């Protein structure tokens, strides 16, 4: 026990690797939220009239809504008037055409994160639409994507260059009044990514966006919209890190996916926002709405997430299985340590016939953290032969953490087969003993066992991400079990 | 809606306050009414009532009504008795004890089994000692606390066992339904069961009503099992098809006590039953066994909450449901393992069989765990009859209807076969088999 405590101590004193602040000028709007601020954001981004109206509609809904209190998380009340809703790097005016023109400080930041753009460009073959405090500063591999007919750009560019597509799909999966945070995001979102895959196209590379919160007191409100037309395929990677700061920051993103007939979208996330220090001070509030709409027959949406960061995570990537024979998948590893709190899971809404969904969720809780799985599987009356399989396992490390499971299963069709199973346990002494006996030290043994525990999820991640995820997991949990 | 209902019940209370049993402190009644005034009735916006709308109950103005007529139909009560089982039987009509219909053989000396109202203030001290500080929780418990009039008090002193089971029969509604303009009756029975150290008992509660009668039963049972006590507890809910039933069973278990709870919901138009279990000392063990059968437009909601508060406590929960017609079933099972409760073992499973396309089931098995050295699992399934099993039987020349009935019966039998008393088992088997086609054929297999 003392040994364990010592190791936990050692772990909690391990400072956040990516904690640094890049010092560049930002064009920040004074804190506060009202219709004028929204008009200002819209004007700065030279948005069309309809989008401003759409934002204002969302804002009016938001003012009538109350903050949800049902999640198994606790935090002080957020003062939404104390947040600045717009912050863009100054460099924007110069309009960088290539990486060379990008503010070198930005590049430095990415370098520290271990994800240098130019290296990735050459080595990984990944097109990166990097979001640095709300405005995209660099987009690579545009030509190659353009050849395939794929549109992959920042949201603001999409509004300028593809207004019809944006207007058709924006808010069609997550309506403006969907929930408190989605409404807030709809009102004040500053940028994000837009991706459109035309008919019968297989996106030639994996698309990736790295988000990073930088300016103090700036909540980030990204908006991501991915549309896959009939018969197309895209794999999208999203990764997050944030610098160290003592004040809690709000992050309320919205991600919308639309898959038409026989299209497939694979969305992978590694989330490593700043989790706060060992006393639970600081850290990001991550209140995200992610939803995919399997609109066409035979379409497929797969969410894979590795959540290691954030002080509070409130996130339920969902699938609406509207098309017949469509399928949804959710693979998740959520790790919480110290005073982190996570309430995450998924919703699988079966509307079409022969729809299938799979949910694999692994929660790991250490220190004084609380980790909850909350999921909904809804089989509507017309979803004949729907099939769901859910497995959610929790691993506890230390006697002061908590692991919770709140699955909702609503079945209105007798042809459906729904299975749910969940287990909660700690790393067993037998498993540890087995490894120790074969000359593997305790630390490695724990890592092996935890990685084995998460294997079902990691194998769904693209290669580069899988490596990063395993590393993250080891760092987050180093020494958490004795 | 809720305000109207609250003021109706406040008026009812004023009308009947002087006739209510005296052994229940007036202070607790008025506290409960205060709770009702402040909180009102739950709505679907309350998480615990998300799937159950109680407005059919709050819309109707149920009344405490008159005392039972002397000429109660004996045949009806007779059907509810376990005639071949030697037991203490206490019969209540719309919440009031009927001495004529009850039969109470001799008890071991020192043990108490009696109706609350039968001896005035004689129970006050016992009630205060064991059940003095229960919190209210929701509006229906408040109603029960305010209107408490009668029920059963079972007290078994240390080291004693009551050999014969205690059977409590609650009969609701009116025999004559020809005057629908009259308000329907309600009853708020409260049963209090206290088992001393190493004591043992078997308790059976049966809730039933006059056929097609509309009434509201709002029952509450509190159970205390002291160190090493052993209780076998059954609740059979077979209310009429137009009845409303809200029930709560609260179980508190001390060291090394063991309670086997069998929850059987068969009737009622709208039925809700909460079981709250607290394992407050090491070694306590609870087994929750449940079966719900719904048809027509029935709505049956089962909530269970098991709190492991100390180390080395065990809970096993196994609930099964069969839904037919346009019915809807709700299951919510919650297990909380508190920080100190290391070495806890908690297992929960819920299986649902949907027989009709219009039936619906909403299930929510929850785990809340704050200790690390625990073994906890839960599982939930919803499905139809297995095609392979059907094929197996068909290939052996069993016709389709019989095969379906057999498999349905077998599904329910998983729960029924754990019942210790053959008489209870038989009654359930009859009532399940009675619902299925080709009953006679299945009965052959049942032999």
Image (cartoon, coloured by chain):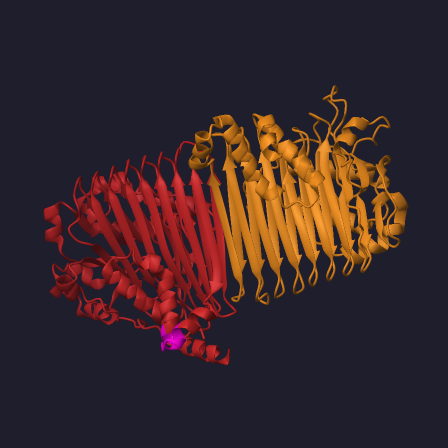
Whether residue A139 is situated above or below residue A165 in the rendered picture: below
Residue at coordinates 52% horizontally, 35% vertically from top-left?
A: B407
The image shows residue A106, relative to residue B359, as above or below, that is below
Between residues B255 and B363, which one lies in front from this camera angle? B255
Task: Please check the rendered image and state whether residue A440 is part of the magenta-colored stretch, yes or no.
Answer: yes
Left or right, B358 with reference to A470: right
Q: Which residues are magenta?
A: A435-444
Q: Which chain, by letter, is red?
A: A
Q: Based on the picture, tell me whether residue A447 belongs to the magenta stretch.
A: no
Q: Which percent across, then down, holds residue A411?
A: 47, 38
Quadrant housing residue A92: bottom left
Looking at the image, residue A10 sits to the left or right of residue B220; the answer is left
Query: Which of B117 and A242 lies nearest the eye of the viewer?
Result: B117
Q: Position of residue B391 (x, y in %)?
A: 43, 33
Residue A21 placement (x, y as % from top left)? 29, 71
The answer to whether residue A213 is seen in the rendering is no
């Amino acid at each position: 026990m003392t040994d364990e405590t010592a190791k936990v101590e050692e772990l909690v004193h391990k400072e956040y690797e990516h904690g640094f602040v890049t010092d560049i000028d930002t064009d920040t709007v004074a804190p506060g939220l009202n219709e004028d601020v929204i008009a200002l954001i819209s004007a700065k981004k030279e948005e069309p009239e309809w989008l401003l109206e759409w934002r204002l509609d969302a804002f009016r809904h938001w003012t009538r809504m109350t903050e949800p209190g049902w999640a198994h998380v606790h935090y002080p009340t957020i003062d939404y008037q104390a947040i600045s809703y717009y912050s863009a790097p100054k460099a924007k005016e110069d309009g960088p055409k290539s990486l060379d023109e990008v503010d070198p400080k930005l590049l430095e930041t990415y370098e520290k994160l271990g994800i240098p753009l130019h290296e990735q460009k050459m080595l990984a073959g990944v097109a990166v639409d990097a979001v640095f405090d709300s405005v995209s500063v660099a987009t690579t591999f545009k030509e190659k994507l353009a050849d395939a007919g794929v549109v992959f750009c920042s949201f603001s560019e999409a509004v300028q260059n593809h207004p019809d597509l944006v207007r058709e799909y924006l808010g069609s999966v997550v309506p403006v009044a969907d929930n408190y945070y989605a409404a807030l995001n709809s009102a004040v979102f500053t940028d994000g990514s837009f991706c459109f895959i035309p008919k019968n196209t297989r996106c030639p590379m994996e698309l990736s966006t790295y988000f990073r919160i930088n300016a103090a007191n700036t909540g980030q409100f990204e908006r991501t919209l991915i549309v896959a037309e009939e018969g197309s395929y895209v794999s999208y990677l999203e990764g997050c890190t944030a610098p160290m700061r003592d004040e809690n920051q709000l992050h309320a993103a919205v991600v919308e996916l639309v898959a038409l007939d026989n299209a497939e979208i694979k969305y992978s996330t590694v989330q490593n926002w700043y989790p706060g220090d060992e006393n639970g001070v600081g850290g990001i509030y991550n209140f995200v709405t992610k939803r995919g709409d399997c609109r066409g027959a035979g379409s497929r949406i797969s969410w894979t997430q590795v959540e290691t960061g954030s002080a509070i995570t409130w996130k339920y990537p969902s699938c609406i299985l509207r098309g017949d024979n469509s399928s949804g998948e959710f693979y998740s590893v959520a790790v919480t340590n110290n005073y982190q709190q996570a309430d995450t899971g998924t919703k699988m809404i079966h509307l079409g016939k022969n729809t299938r969904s799979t949910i694999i969720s692994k929660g790991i809780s250490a220190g004084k953290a609380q980790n909850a799985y909350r999921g909904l599987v809804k089989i509507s009356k017309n979803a004949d032969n729907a099939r769901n399989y859910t497995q959610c396992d929790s691993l506890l490390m230390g006697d002061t953490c908590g692991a919770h499971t709140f699955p909702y299963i609503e079945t209105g069709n007798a042809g459906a087969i729904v299975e749910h199973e969940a287990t909660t346990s700690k790393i067993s002494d037998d498993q540890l003993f087995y490894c120790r006996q074969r000359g593997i030290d305790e630390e490695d043994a724990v890592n092996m066992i935890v990685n084995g525990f998460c294997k079902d999820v990691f194998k769904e991640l693209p290669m580069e991400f899988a490596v990063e995820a395993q590393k993250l997991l080891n760092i987050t949990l180093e020494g958490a079990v004795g | 809606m809720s305000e109207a209902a609250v003021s109706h019940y406040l008026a009812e209370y004023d009308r009947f306050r002087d006739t209510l049993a005296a052994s229940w402190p007036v202070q607790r009644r008025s506290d409960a009414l205060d709770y009702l005034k402040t909180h009102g009735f739950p709505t679907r916006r309350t998480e615990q009532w998300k799937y159950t709308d109680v407005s059919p109950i709050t819309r109707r103005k149920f009344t405490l009504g008159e005392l039972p007529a002397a000429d109660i139909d004996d045949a009806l009560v007779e059907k509810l008795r376990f005639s071949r089982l030697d037991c203490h039987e206490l019969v209540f009509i719309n919440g009031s004890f009927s001495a004529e219909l009850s039969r109470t053989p001799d008890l071991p000396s020192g043990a108490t089994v009696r109706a609350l109202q039968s001896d005035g203030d004689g129970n006050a001290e016992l009630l205060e000692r064991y059940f003095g500080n229960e919190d209210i929780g929701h509006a229906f418990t408040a109603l029960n606390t305010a209107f408490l009039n009668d029920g059963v008090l079972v007290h078994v002193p240390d080291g004693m066992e009551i050999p014969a089971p205690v059977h409590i029969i609650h009969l609701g509604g009116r025999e004559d339904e020809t005057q629908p303009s009259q308000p329907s009756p309600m009853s708020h029975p409260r049963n209090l069961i206290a088992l001393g150290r190493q004591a043992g008992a078997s308790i059976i509660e049966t809730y039933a009503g006059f056929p097609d009668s509309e009434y509201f039963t709002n029952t509450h049972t509190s159970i205390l099992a002291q160190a090493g006590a052993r209780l076998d507890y059954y609740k059979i809910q077979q209310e009429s098809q137009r009845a409303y039933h809200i029930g709560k069973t609260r179980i508190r278990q001390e060291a090394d006590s063991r309670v086997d709870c069998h929850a059987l919901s068969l009737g009622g138009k709208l039925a809700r039953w909460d079981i709250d279990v607290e394992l407050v000392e090491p070694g306590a063990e609870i087994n929750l066994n449940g079966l719900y059968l719904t048809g027509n437009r029935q709505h049956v909601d089962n909530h269970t909450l098991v709190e492991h508060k100390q180390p080395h406590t065990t809970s096993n929960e196994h609930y099964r449901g069969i839904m037919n017609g346009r019915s809807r079933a709700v299951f919510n099972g919650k297990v909380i393992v508190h920080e100190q409760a290391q070495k806890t073992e908690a297992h929960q499973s819920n299986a649902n069989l949907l027989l009709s396309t219009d039936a619906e089931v909403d299930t929510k098995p929850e785990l809340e765990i704050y200790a690390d050295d625990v073994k906890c699992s839960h599982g939930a399934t919803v499905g139809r009859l297995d095609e392979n099993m059907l094929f197996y039987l068909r290939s052996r020349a069993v016709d389709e209807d019989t095969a379906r009935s057999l498999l349905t019966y077998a599904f329910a039998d998983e729960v029924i076969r754990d019942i210790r008393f053959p008489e209870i088992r038989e009654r359930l088997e009859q009532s399940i088999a009675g619902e299925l086609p080709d009953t006679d054929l299945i009965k052959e297999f049942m032999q």
